Structures are given as C-alpha cells and as structure tokens.
Amino acid sequence: MKRTRYVLTALGVFLGLLVMLASPGTDRALAHKEKHTPDQLKAFDEEFMEQVKIGDLLFHGDGATEKRLRVTLSKTGMACAMCHPFGSDNHPHEFPKFQEQINKFATLRDMINWCIEKPNEGVKIDPDGDAMKALETYIYWSNRGSKLDPGRH
Amino acid sequence: MDDHDRLDLARDKARRAWWRKARSCSEIQRTRREMDAELRKPGERPDPSLAITRRIFLHKSLLAGAAAGAATYGWFPLVNTLDLAFGAETFKFAWVSDNHLYPKNVNTRFVEKATRAVKEVQAMSPPADFLIHGGDLAQLGDPVELDLGNDILKEVKIRKVFIPGEHDWYLDMGAKWQQLFGPPNWTFDHKGVRFVGLDTVSRGPDYWTAKKMTPKERMGHMATLDGSVAGAWAGVGRDQLEWLNRTLSNWPKGNPVVIFSHNPLYEYYPPWNFWVRDWREVHEVLKPYTNVTNVHGHTHQVLYNEVGKMRSIGMLATSWTWPYAPEGVPTLTRCLVRVDPGDHFDGVGWSRLTMSAEKIQNEYVMWRKDIVGEALWDSGCADNVNQVLSPRIADREWPYYGAYK
C-alpha cells in the first residue's frame, strides 16, 4: 500500500515536470536564467522600435501601412497626429480612468478605438490586433518619461 | 475634510508647483525675456502698459456683469485692449483662418464650420470694414480645395484681404493661391491705421529637390505639423524684411500698425513652426514703432504675448484646435478651455476686432460658452503639464520608412 503511494507520488511529480516543460511559457521562463547579451538587448530594442515606427505611421495617417494591416483609422482625411502632435494630449499615463466621452471606466485601447470611431469616423480595430499594439506602442513611446498618474482627469 | 479631499488638495498643490516650474525654467522663456529687455531700452517710450489693458478689461467685464472673482484674473486673451493715442474712427474688422478644407467628397465638417464663420461675418451689424483671411484655407493645397474655399468666401460681400498658409502653398508653390487671391504680402492704410499682410510661409528651405519628391509628397510633409522633414519653414525672409522696413519708413513711429501673419512673429515652439525663424530680425525692424499689434493664425488656439513693444494675438481656427505646445506658452496667455473632441464645433471659431481712438479689442467668436479654462483641470495648458513628449521618428530615415501618399 505504502509502496503504491510512493509510485503514484513519483508519477505525479514526473507528469507535473512534463507539463511544465511542454507549456508555451517555458522558453521565456528559462531565458531569464541566462544573463542578457548585448545582441539580445539590441534585438529586443529593434523589435520595440519596429512597432513604434509602424504605430507612428498609422498615427500620421499613412495609407500604405493602414492597407497592409487592413484597418481604416479615418474616413475624414484626419489623422490622429492632427490633434495629437508628438503624441501630445493623449495622456497614456493617466489610463485607466473614467472617460467622459465614453461614459465608462476606460483603458487607453478603449480611448483609441473611440477616437477612431467618433472624431475620425473610421472603423474600430481589434483591441488585441497588430494595429492596436503598434498605435499603443507609439503613444507610450512618444510619452515616455511622463509620470504615471492613473485615474487623473 | 476627509482623506480624499486632503489627497486632492495635495495633488492640486503639486500640479501648481510643477506648472510654475515648467513655465519659469523654459529656455524659450529665458530667450524671450532677454529679447524683451533688449527691445525695451531705458528712456524709450514704453508700450501701453499691461495695467491699462487689465483696467480696461476689468471695466468691461464688470459692465457685463462678469463675476468679480473671474475678472481679477484679467483674461487678456479673451478681450485684449490697448491704448492707441491717435485720432482714428471706430471701426471693426473680422479675422477668419485655418479652415483646412478638404474636397467635399472627403470631409464636409470643415466646410460646415467655415460656412458658419463666413455667414456670421457677413451678418455683423454694423458691418465690418473688411475681412482678413489668415491662411490655411486648404488642407493639401489642392485647387479643388482652394476653389471650394473661394466659393464659400464669396458669401462675404465686404472687402477681403488674404495672406497664405503653408497648406495653401506647397502643392504648386502658391500658383493657384496667387491666381485666386493676389500677391502674398501687401499693405494699406485704413482710418489712421497701417495694415500689413506678411507672407511667412513661402520661404521654406528646399527639402524636396534632392530627394526627388513629387509635389504631393512635398505637400504631405509640409502638412504634417509635427514632422521633421520640412524643418524650419516659417520665416519672413531678408527681401520681405527690407520691404517691411521700407513700408513702415514713412509712417509716424507712434501711430498704430497692425501686422497680419500666418505664423506668430515670436518664438513660441519652433518644432511645430509656432514662430518665424527670423523673428529677431522682424523685431529689429519694428523696434522704432510703439503701437504694433501682430494678429496671427496657425496655432489654432487662444494666445496672447508681448515682446518688446509688439503685442501678439493668436486666433482660433474654424477647423480644429491644436493642443498647447509642451513648452513656450507665453505667460501672459490665459489658456483655452479643454475642448471636447466629440463635438466638431467645440474650441473653434473666428474673431471680431474693433479699433477705436483708444484701443484695439479682440473678441473670440467661439461656439461655446466658456473660452478660457481657469481651473487646472479645465485649462488646455494645465491639463498637459504632466506630459513629457518626444518628436516623431518614422520620417527621420531616408528612404522613408513609410511613404507618404
């Protein structure tokens, strides 16, 4: 009886390890056990700046980028940057907060979609899609250094 | 007072301190103070003082029954007044600018707002002596846009004078605009005032030839306020400075001069061309004249400044508002109230100016009740005090990361 319990416990531990190793997050978890190389850091930065540039183009109304990502951010000729030069007046560091225009507690992504749909009369984009991630990246990048102040009106 | 109130008070105090620091430490503010000191030498006749401006406004606001608390702020940009010691008749003129019209099949909202402004100008009673259009009638310099603007302005039957904006110019280098509206700079005398229209847009550095840009690409970069390609395009230019000098040389030094320009004639925020790059030279030319008022567009916001003996008033757009720049907002400006981006008619409008023997008075005609925001959370300046911004990046590489279409 006791022996059977030992065998079952060992089997459980083995299966648990197997599940951990096979899970999708394992690579990332293990990656942090090594010191970062300069090449890695450069690659991380390049990946980030690539998104910043795509977001910058979308934000400034670049038709080719919109077409490639299959989004319509505006039907009025207006681009985001026409009201938000240098990403100003976006206040990404103040989200989440209650947003009057939407009349609800909102995230930055909610607000981006509101601007696309209302003032710009465009088509709302997938909140988790590539275009949203790029826009969000550009907005955060252009406001980096701003003090976090969530909830501020 | 509960914890929530105490926290609010502490945050409010911190924001005020932050705002004071941001305004007092700016390099632009320092430059502006030095320039002002240079232009106001001891013994020179000073400009009509700020106190007079404040007094006259207080008087008017009390007559209008405005709250005394609000009046003590002295809302300079809302109603600017200054003494003009000359015997001019009282008259009015109107300013409309920055309509940024697209062809009607792209966007009709800007057409609606331009039309509303023009109808209101025409309905002025007594009528204005003239309308000055301050530039950026079109969005992308398209002849269709300029023709559309010209048609809308035909509603105004009084005299019209025009100066160009960069959006009108860089598709065909001003050909269509000049065909419709004539030369980009001019002067005329009216009831004791010398009016001057300056062209501050056409002398931009050539950023297109070496890169073999199409006219449309050239216009696209010019139309991007926060772009890095067109550079410091706003300027008066040596030739026009000489013309300005000649134009004013036979005018008595104490008599009123009103200069219209698309860009402000001082340094507010160069990255967005909220200036002219040769503003110091402009002030050298204007130095002997003691009653100079500059009325400008381009910035799409309530602005008021004084440098040396020149006053400067920024006009509203009919199209949309620009946010206040991250630095350089003149300390004399009471900022525009935060506008509602969901309402196309909010924060935009035109101006009605009255000149009399004593003063020039500017009245912003904005299509909402409140024009300036005094409370920190309602002010277009204070709202942005906690943001740190970076210039855009995607247009800094060549060939461009993305192509402008």
Image: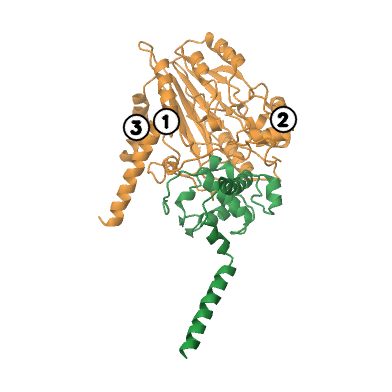
- Label 3 Cα crowd, 10 Å radius (few <14 / some 14-19 / many 20+): many
Q: Residue reaching furthest bottom?
A: A1
Above or below: residue B307 compared with residue A149: above
Q: Colour of chain B?
A: orange
Q: Nearer the viewer, residue B319 or A30?
A: A30
Q: Is residue B81 among the parts visible in the rendering?
A: no
- Label 2 Cα crowd, 10 Å radius (few <14 / some 14-19 / many 20+): few
Q: Residue at x 40, y 23 (%)?
A: B33
Q: Which mark is residue A141?
A: none
Asked if badges 3 and 2 are on one and the same chain, I answer yes
Residue A23 percent coordinates (x, y): 58, 68
- Dividing the picture into quadrants, the one containing residue A146 is top left
Q: Residue at x 52, y 21 (%)?
A: B279
- Label 1 Cα crowd, 10 Å radius (few <14 / some 14-19 / many 20+): some
- Sooner in the amino-acid sequence: mark 1 or mark 2: 1
Q: Which residue is mark 2?
A: B211
Q: Colour of chain A?
A: green
SS category of the residue bearing label 1: loop
Residue B199 percent coordinates (x, y): 61, 23
Q: Residue at x 32, y 35 (%)?
A: B72
In the picture provided, is B15 more to the left or to the right than B255?
A: left
- The kind of residue on which mark 3 rests is Leu
- The kind of residue on which mark 2 rests is Lys
- Sooner in the amino-acid sequence: mark 3 or mark 2: 3
For disc 3, the chain is: B
Q: Which residue is mark 3?
A: B58
Residue B221 percent coordinates (x, y): 65, 34
Mark 3–mark 1 distance (CA, rounded to whole Å): 30 Å
Of tags 3 and 2, the one toward the viewer is 2
SS category of the residue bearing label 3: helix
